[in-house]
Image (cartoon, rainbow, N blue to C red):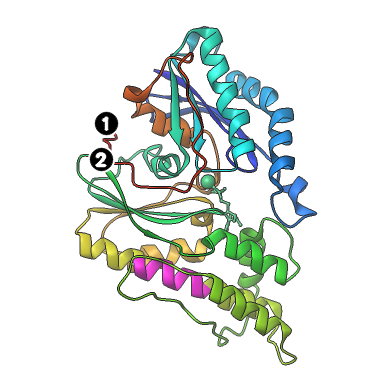
Amino acid sequence: MNILAIESSCDETAAAVVVDGRIVRSNVVASQSELHASTGGVVPEVAARAHLRMLVPVIRQALNNAECTWSDLDAIAGTSGPGLPGALLIGFNAARGLAFARDLPFIPVDHIEGHVRANWLGDEEPPLPALALVVSGGHTELILIDENGFFERLGGTRDDAAGEAFDKVARLLDLGYPGGPVVSQLAAESTDRSFRLPRAWLTGTDDFSFSGLKTAVLHTVQDDGAPPPAEIAWAFEDSVADVLSKKAVRVAEREGVTSLLVAGGVAANSRIRELIIERSSVPVFIPPPELCTDNAAMIGAAAGVHLDQAVRPEVAIDIDPTPYRSKVRPLE
Ligand code: KG4
Ligand code: ZN
């Protein structure tokens, strides 16, 4: 089962060919980060128009890299949301249009399920039940996946997403966009690691909050006696990693899961990876960095277990850009 998957929910234009939801034959990503660097964040219309320019070459490259012709394809998948509406529409409608032209089934895929499903693209299949921590530029979600593959959202951020906090702190420290990798790089250069920033535990809930931490960074930067930027970056990264890892591990223990899955762009962060692996008592699954940030292979992975949701491309169908909700339905 060869699935061509297309992703355009935010600022990466991506296409991939994935076999049976498990094997990546090609995975092409055109990042718009340079385009958004001058504004320090994604401008939705700029993102949508860049998708329009990049999509056809990206799809062609994905087919070429997979050594696939149109007639080798069995289905086409597209991200339906969450995401920026204008950006989503470009990839979703291209995927649906191609399915229509080729008379193939069309599979709409939830972007968050895609991030989680990137953990099925490795050699080893994660055992269920599992707890998934999805941390990206737009999301911080804790999702319980039961033994039948039902997704249930347990909690998430009440304000900024973890990646959004990295991006905003990068702006405060004048480091550019996207913030995660540059903040992390600067943090690694710190020599004195005694400066600490607050942690919002939100005890008694499975929720997170990062806006207070961001404000604490702002006040620190404005202070005359502020520590050097590398020490601020370290203290910020350590606070995010401490809260994410401790809460995820605690919830995993409470729910009695057999594996802990981490996904999303922020899962590329080495401090976060390190602390989660160190603290977890169950096996931890984290995709390689290129499958953590937005890509279409993960959409192909989710599509592979959602063949039952395939629709004929001519049916009336819409994107769903709204934030992630529990999707109570089986994965396979
Ligand atoms: O999953 P993703 O590519 O897009 C969304 O769905 O949002 O995540 C992008 C986010 C950005 O906020 C970026 O700053 C963050 O992931 N990120 C990182 C790292 N690499 C990317 N955050 C922390 N450390 C990193 N190494
Ligand atoms: Zn994402």
Residue type at mark 2 is Gly
Disc 2, disc 1: CB below 8 Å? Answer: yes
Q: Is residue 196 left or right of residue 325?
A: right
Q: Quadrant of residue 211?
A: bottom right
12 inside magenta stretch = no
Query: What span is colored magenta in the figure?
Result: 238-247
As measured in the structure, the alpha-carbon distance from the residue carrying label 2 to the one carrying label 1 is 7 Å
Nearest the viewer among 253 and 125 is 253
> Chief secondary structure of the magenta span?
helix
Nearest the viewer among 58 and 79 is 79
**Residue 66 higher or lower than 275, as above or below:** above
**Residue 97 higher or lower than 188, as above or below:** above
Q: Secondary structure at mark 1?
A: loop
Q: Quadrant of residue 237?
A: bottom right
Q: Residues within 10 Å of mark 2 (few under 14, many from 20)?
A: some
Q: Which residue is mark 1?
A: 332
The residue located at (54%, 63%) in the rendering is 160
Mark 2 or mark 1: whose residue is earlier in sequence = 2
Residue 55 at x, y = what percent? 67, 27
- Quadrant location of the C terminus in the rendered image: top left
Q: Which residue is mark 2?
A: 149
The residue located at (22%, 55%) in the rendering is 257
* Residue that protrudes farthest toward the bottom in the picture: 225
Q: Quadrant of residue 177?
A: bottom right
